[in-house]
Amino acid sequence: MPAKVLISGSSGLLGSALIQNLGADGYEITRLIRKPTSAAGQIAWDFAQPLAPQSVSGFDAVIHLAGESIASRWTKSKKKEIRDSRVLGTRHLAEALARSASPPRVLISASAIGFYGDRDDEVLREDSASGGSGFLPEVCREWEAAAEPAVNAGIRTAFLRTGIVLSAKGGALKQMLPPFRMGLGGRIGSGRQWMSWIDLEDEIGAIRHILANESLRGPVNSVSPHPVTNAEFTKTLASVLSRPAIFPMPAFAARLVFGQMGEELLLGSQKVEPAKLTTSGYLFRKPNLGGALEGILKS
């Protein structure tokens, strides 16, 4: 198992939980942060600028999670921030790792199931093509391609195509909880669109599984083996909270309020299967939505 790990995006929901988890097991963690620093265990970087190869040399593993949040209305400037933070940041990091004197054995670079686009009821695995010309599939394709320097340098590179990460501490679930707790929740649009999700504990477990498993490289779908429709998700969440879910948001309202973000994130359908994780022996701790939500909200 890797001992010295460099992590970007360490202040986010996943990054902060991952650092706590790895640190508890004795990993030596260094954080790649976007602000000036002289503190031990931190390296400052500007994702828009090249990174000095010597600054990222000597790590056993690099876990690259940094990226501007997509959870807001996508204005022209917001889209640029989302794209640049992922594509430029990944390219500059990959170039620096490729040119470093002591490159890592493995690079895990964040991606998303947005790579697949809106695919209705189609079952999507790692070998499924990227779909459509939407903003998310376009960004995800560029995001993954930006790591090519690391791949070409022989660094084992895995792209963590993550679904909706469930945690009460942040992300989509935290935003959904207030209206659902007041009994004001409900399905979005038809409710037939598929939601591919993963419990935060399993997201961390998947990352650790990739670190330890030399066979895993390229895209790896980080989602539960049991995706649900939006109608099933909202019904289950309401049931766990002992509240009704009788206030649906019509599709036109989602588009009106959230614009393109609502169209792609809230109304898009992605039924994703974690084929590589399953076949490589990863055992999900929270494979079913009801159990995951019970654990998150009633623990």
Image (spheres, rainbow, N blue to C red):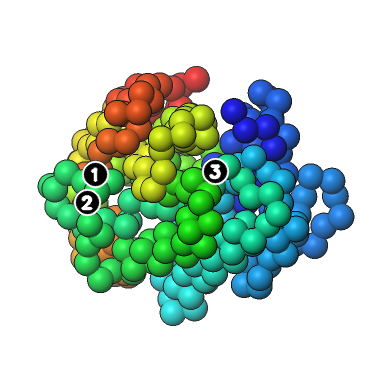
Left or right of 126? Residue 83 is: right
Residue extending furthest toward the bottom? 76
Residue 292 vs 59, above or below: the answer is: above
What residue is shown with label 2?
128
Q: Position of residue 254 (x, y in %)?
A: 28, 62
Residue extending furthest toward the right? 38
Callout in the foreground (1, 3): 3
**Which residue is pictured at 27% across the width and 36% down the height?**
275
Mark 3 surroundings within 10 Å by alpha-carbon count, few (fewer than 14), some (14 through 19), many (20 or more): many
Q: Earlier in the sequence, mark 3 or mark 2?
A: 3
Q: Position of residue 20 (x, y in %)?
A: 65, 32
Front residue of 78 and 54: 54
Q: Earlier in the sequence, mark 1 or mark 3?
A: 3
The reply to whether discs 1 and 2 touch (Cβ–Cβ < 8 Å) is: yes
Residue 285 vs 223, above or below: the answer is: above
**Which residue is pictured at 54% across the width and 66% down the height?**
91
Q: Secondary structure at mark 1?
A: loop
Disc 3 marks a residue whose amino acid type is Val
The reply to whether discs 3 and 2 touch (Cβ–Cβ < 8 Å) is: no
* Label number found at residue 125: 1
Report the quarter where the N terminus lies: top right
* Label number found at residue 106: 3
**Which residue is pictured at 22% across the width and 57% down the height?**
129
Disc 2 marks a residue whose amino acid type is Ser
Q: Secondary structure at mark 2?
A: loop
Residue 83 vs 185, above or below: the answer is: below
Left or right of 65? Residue 30 is: right
Q: Secondary structure at mark 3?
A: strand
Front residue of 117 and 26: 26
Disc 1 marks a residue whose amino acid type is Arg
